[in-house]
Image: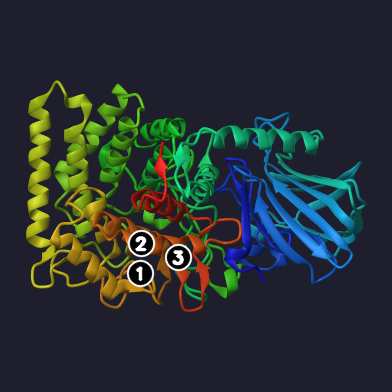
Amino acid sequence: MASRIEDYGFISDNQTVALVGKDGSIDWLCVPRIDSGACFAALLGDQDNGRFRIRPKADDARVTRRYRDGTLILETEFRTNDGVVRLIDFMPQRSMHQLDRNPTVVRIVEGVSGTVSMRLDLRMRFDYGWVVPWVRHIDGGLTAVAGPDGLVLRSPIGLKGHDLHTSAEFSVGAGDRLPFVLTWFDPAGDVPDAVDAEELLDGCERRWRDWSSRGTLTGPLADQIRPSMTVLKGLIYEPTGAIVAAGTTSLPEQIGGERNWDYRYCWLRDASMTMQALVQGGYLEEAKDWRDWLLRAIAGDPQQQQIMYAVDGTRRLPELELSWLSGYEDSAPVRIGNGAAAQYQLDVPGEVLDALNVARSAGMAPDKHAWSVLQTIIKHVYRVWDKPDEGIWEVRGGAQDFVYSKVMAWVAADRAARSQHLADDPHAAKKLRGLADYIHADIMAKGFDEERNTFVQAYGSKAMDASLLQIPIVGFLPGDDPRVVGTIKAVREELEQDGFVARYLTETGASDGLSGTEGSFLICSFWLIQAMALAGQLDEARELLQQMLDLRNDVGLLSEEYDPVNKRMLGNFPQAFSHIGLVNAALASKACSSG
């Protein structure tokens, strides 16, 4: 069985990611890019769906882990009765040395003290654990080939093949360093040449530290916030600038349930919010790269714009179920692709324009081409802002007039009216300001419950929705406005449990067309922290922030959701939304600041 979600660390080469468990097992790796098929898929099935485990033979080894400061180089230390061994895992950026387009995982086993007996278990399976490759030995390692996929493992120890997997046993003494280099390649070409693992480690660490040194976060909790910035960087697909929502697919929102989705794509909403967090941390280059990706992805008829795209801008993301995978802890089905790509979600233009406004304010140079594209978005908002949509939570039970969606339509008009591109066109700015004011009045008339003193999930509804906490965050109303304070109170009374906030109550809110329940969405708790801080409730906000910081796993990672009853993480991992929320909540509560 796969490890608990919180027992994984992750490594990235800014084109794909791998999940590494505390037991030294890589249970998830998609190659050659993050939305490709997995060659290790034990995360969503069992060991025969592919894994790469290196660990001591002793079952009682004590484990500690850390990332090297400012990097995604993961160090797992196993302490046994016979000694201590360290496993160093990383993915070098592909522009290094001869890697070219070949994703590579490097594992270095380092003897720290004593002599430790080790065991290796390698099960290579392509196409999400379905295809068993043809494996043959070569000088210094082995290759595995099936169809369009190939892997080459180079190892200083002897490897044995049996029962469709590869194994080895070896000992590591103090001072020993044994490299294991696994590289994907296209079998139609040549097997990649061997590379020096130590050189790759030095170069990878140098690049990560150079990137981290550009950060500008300061303040009492800045050191705790910086790892979240590194996570967000690790979720960027560097060749295009796209920002994916998470590194995995189908990790469940309820153990044993059907709420299992593929998050290895670029949602405009998630990416816009990620960009804002990166900008506040001093990373304008990533903001520009994402803007350039955005302009390519959404080019064309604005009525054909989508809420999400593949990392290269591909629009068709057909949703399929993989019947041969049992799912994480039997949470089926396992899905790849995402049918929500075809949904209409009114909030997305507002999030995009808000993010670009933040980036421009932070110093990103304006782009004339960007403005012409954004004008088409605004014209589209004029036409559709009063139409029902599926909303931020992508419900599958029918469109509604969601209040948050209308608020973000207001944001789109408001940010466009403020744009420096309109400095010489007061008529256009006035027209946009008029649209913003009209939408604002409509929301106040139809989306606010005077009797309960709170905004509601949708026009004509009595249900609450955590996205309403965004109302003061985006500036729709001041944080200390009585209607905002009343909304915060209502959200806490109806959706909060011990600091954990649900998106909405499935039994009383929008019908999402699915069975079962779900965990608490972590970003909703971070929104609550921001809203409370803006309302002047700073002591409570800081207390809740510390609770959320303590929720991270031992290497600082967060998933999408949390189960406060069973006290475990749920949902895809690591989740950009959660780390965005952490950064923004810390800034709002003045736990750190952007220098």
**For the residues carrying marks 1 and 3, which lies nearer the camera in this image?**
3
Specify whether residue 390 is in view: no
- Label located before the other in sequence (1 or 2): 1
Find the distance from the CA under tag 2 to the CA under tag 3: 14 Å
Left of 549 or right of it: where is 348? left
274 vs 344, nearest the viewer: 274
Amino acid type shown at disc 3: Gln
Q: Residue at 53% of width from left, 55% of height from top?
A: 574
Label 2 Cα crowd, 10 Å radius (few <14 / some 14-19 / many 20+): many
Residue placed under numbered mark 1 in the picture: 502
Q: In which quarter of the image is residue 593?
A: top left
Amino acid type shown at disc 2: Cys
Residue placed under numbered mark 2 in the picture: 524
Whether pointer 1 and pointer 3 mark residues with C-beta atoms closer than 8 Å, the reply is: no
- Label located before the other in sequence (2 or 3): 2
Whether pointer 1 and pointer 2 mark residues with C-beta atoms closer than 8 Å, the reply is: yes
**Residue 113 rendering spot, x and y as whole percentages:** 87, 55
193 shown above or below 531: above
Identify the image quadrant of the C terminus: top left
Identify the image quadrant of the N terminus: bottom right
Residue placed under numbered mark 3 in the picture: 547
**For the residues carrying marks 2 and 3, which lies nearer the camera in this image?**
3
